[in-house]
Amino acid sequence: MQTRMRNRFSNGLMHGTLLKRSRQLRNEPTPAEVRLWSHLRLKNLDGARFRRQYPIEGYIVDFCCIKARLIVEVDGSQHADNAAYDERRTQILERQGFRVLRFWNGEVMQNIGGVVEAIFAALHETRTRGSASLRRPGD
């Protein structure tokens, strides 16, 4: 019998194998994930707390800010062949109240400033609905 643990969303259950896989992915990040994580970790982006390789609804997302209900995915070339799967996955996550942002590895590596600004803008949209105060990255 597989071990199961509670997921933090909708009291769903998460198989232990999904948890093990998320831990494995955290230990083997891509260069693009490492680069983006250096900007998101330790609440570096406007105090938002991001988690990486986080299991949600049976999927493992690259980065997630639970409070803002924001998911950030960094996609490699293999995602070009799996567009239908990614679209279905995004729809499921959006039905759970998450906003999903997707960036290509090359975009993260060549334009990290633009990627961080897009994430900041998405956080700003979420927070202005809740009327929170903001400060720009680097301020």
Image (cartoon, helix red, strand yellow):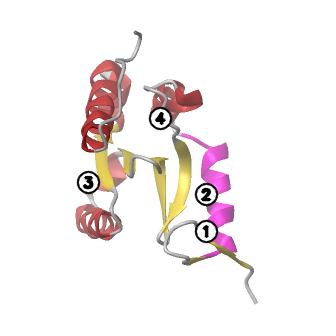
User: Marks 3 and 4: in contact by CB < 8 Å?
Assistant: no
* Magenta-drawn stretch contains 42: no
| Residue shown at 35% from the left, 25% from the top | 134
Q: Residue 93, can we see it?
A: yes
Indicate the amino acid at tag 1.
Answer: Leu
Helix, strand or loop at label 2? It is helix
Which one is in front in this view, the residue at disc 4 or the one at disc 2?
Answer: 4
Indicate the amino acid at tag 4.
Answer: Ala
65 or 91: nearer the viewer: 65
User: Marks 1 and 2: in contact by CB < 8 Å?
Assistant: yes
CA–CA distance in space, label 2 to label 1:
6 Å
Q: Give the numbered dot on residue 22.
A: 2
Which one is in front in this view, the residue at disc 4 or the one at disc 1?
Answer: 4
Mark 1 nearby-residue class (10 Å; few <14, some 14–19, many ≥20): some
Name the residue that disc number 3 marks. 80
Instruction: Farthest residue to the bottom: give it.
Output: 1
Q: Earlier in the sequence, mark 4 or mark 3?
A: 4
Locate residue 65, reporting x and y percent: 46, 45
Name the residue that disc number 1 marks. 18
CA–CA distance in space, label 4 to label 1:
25 Å
Q: Give the numbered dot on residue 48.
A: 4
Q: Is residue 27 left or right of residue 1?
A: left
Q: Quadrant of the C terminus?
A: top left
